[in-house]
Image: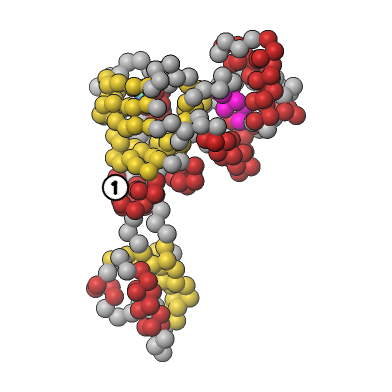
Amino acid sequence: MFRVKNIKKYYGNQQVLGDVSFHVSEGICYGLVGPNGAGKSTLMKIIASIIHEYHGEIQFSPSHMTIGYVPQEIALEETVTARDNLLFFGKLYGLRGQALRNRMNEVLSEIGLTDRGKEKVKTFSGGMKRRLNIGCAIMHQPDLIIMDEPTVGIDPQSRHYIFQMIERFKQENHTIIYASHYMEEIEQLCDETAFMDRGKVVENDRIDHLLEKHAVPSIFVKGRNCLPEHMAQDHAISETDGGYLITTNQPLDMMKKVIEAGNENDREIERLELVKPRLADIFFSLTGSKLRD
Ligand SMILES: Nc1ncnc2c1ncn2[C@@H]1O[C@H](COP(=O)(O)OP(=O)(O)OP(=O)(O)O)[C@@H](O)[C@H]1O
C-alpha cells in the first residue's frame, strides 16, 4: 500500500523526525503511538502531502491512491450546517449534483448525524464535531484514511461510535493510519503499530508479535505476608497497588508456589492474578517514556 522510507524532518535546527521507515499493507489499521511531541502529526502531514519539505521518500502503490486526512484540530465551518460542511468538502473532491447529495446522505448516516444534518455545527457537542470532522475526510471514499488523534476530549459514546466506524472502514478495505497517545485505543483498533519517541520509530510490528517478542509474564499477589520466603532474592519483584508484581517465565509454577506458601499459618492471600502483558509497559521498557507525561 505504501512505504515510508528514511524520512527526516527539521524545523530550523531541530530534528523532529530522524530516519523514519516502515511499510503499511492494504486494509489494515496502522497505529502511530508516542507521547506529545514524538513527531506523529508531522509524519502524518508528510504522508498526507500537507508538508512537502522533508528528506526521504513516501512510495504509494498504486501511485494514484486517494487520501482522506482527519486533522487533530476540528476543521469545520461552525456557522453553517453539517450538510453544508459535507457538501463543501465533497465539492473540493470533485463530487457534483445527485452523486454529491447521495454521498452526503450516506456519510451523514455513517457518522450517525442523519437527524442533525440540517443543524448548525456550533450547536454540536465535541463528539459530534469530531464525527463530522471524520465525515468530511471520507466524502470521496479514500483508499487511505489518516486520523490524527480523533478521540481527544470526547465522550465515551462518541468514542465508541468512532471505533465502530473504523471497524467498518477496515471491513470495506480502506487502510487507516491512526495516531494516538492512548495505548488502549491502539491495542483495540490497530493490527500493526509503530512506537514513536523523540522523532524515531523505536519498534514496529504486528501487535501480537510485539506482545510475544517483548512481554515478560508476571503475576500479581496481594495479602498478609503473601510473599514466600526467598522469592524476593530469586525473582524481579516490584511493589504495586498494595501488593507485589513478580516477573517470571513460569507464571503458573510461581502461582502454585505462592498458593502452597499461603497455606502456612501466618499468611493470607487476598488476590492472586496472572498479569496480561500490556503494550504500554512494552513502550515504557523500550523508551523509558510514559505516553501521558
Ligand atoms: N510548524 C512547526 N514549527 C516548529 N516546530 C514544530 C512545528 N510543528 C511541530 N513542531 C515541533 O515538532 C515536534 C513534533 O511535533 P508533532 O506535532 O509532530 O508531535 P506529535 O507526536 O504529533 O505530538 P502531539 O501529540 O502533541 O500532536 C515537537 O517538538 C513540535 O514542537
Q: Is residue 133 magenta?
A: yes
Characterize the local packing of mark 1: few (<14), some (14-19) or many (20 or more) Cα atoms within 10 angstroms: some
Where's residue 93, x and y in %?
55, 13
What is the number of callouts on the image?
A: 1
Q: Is the magenta region chiefly helix, strand or loop?
A: helix
Residue 10 placement (x, y as % from top left): 28, 22
Q: Residue at x 31, y 52 (%)?
A: 214
In the displayed structure, 168 sits above or below 289; it is: above
Quadrant assignment for ligand 1? top left
The boundaries of the magenta stretch are 131-138
Amino acid marked by disc 1: Leu
Residue lying at the far bottom of the rendered structure:
265
Q: Can residue 242 be seen from the camera position used here?
A: no
Q: Quadrant of residue 274?
A: bottom left
Which x, y percent locates residue 106? Answer: 67, 25
Describe residue 108's horizontal placement relative to residue 288 as left or right.
right
Let me know if residue 81 is in the magenta part.
no
Residue lying at 52% horizontally and 35% vertically, measured from the top left: 170
Where is residue 91 drawn, in percent x and y? 60, 11
Colouring mode (rainbow / by chain / secondary structure / one colour): secondary structure
Name above or below for residue 85 compared with residue 158. Answer: above
Quadrant of the image occupied by residue 62:
top left
Q: Quadrant of the N terminus?
A: top left
Q: Residue at x 35, y 48 (%)?
A: 209
- Residue on which disc 1 sits: 286
Instruction: Give the secondary structure at mark 1.
Output: helix
Q: Is residue 276 visible?
A: yes
- In depth, the one of 78 and 7 nearer the eye is 7
Q: Quadrant of residue 128?
A: top right
Q: Is mark 1 within 8 Å of ligand 1?
A: no
Instruction: Specify the quadrant that holds the C terminus.
Output: top left
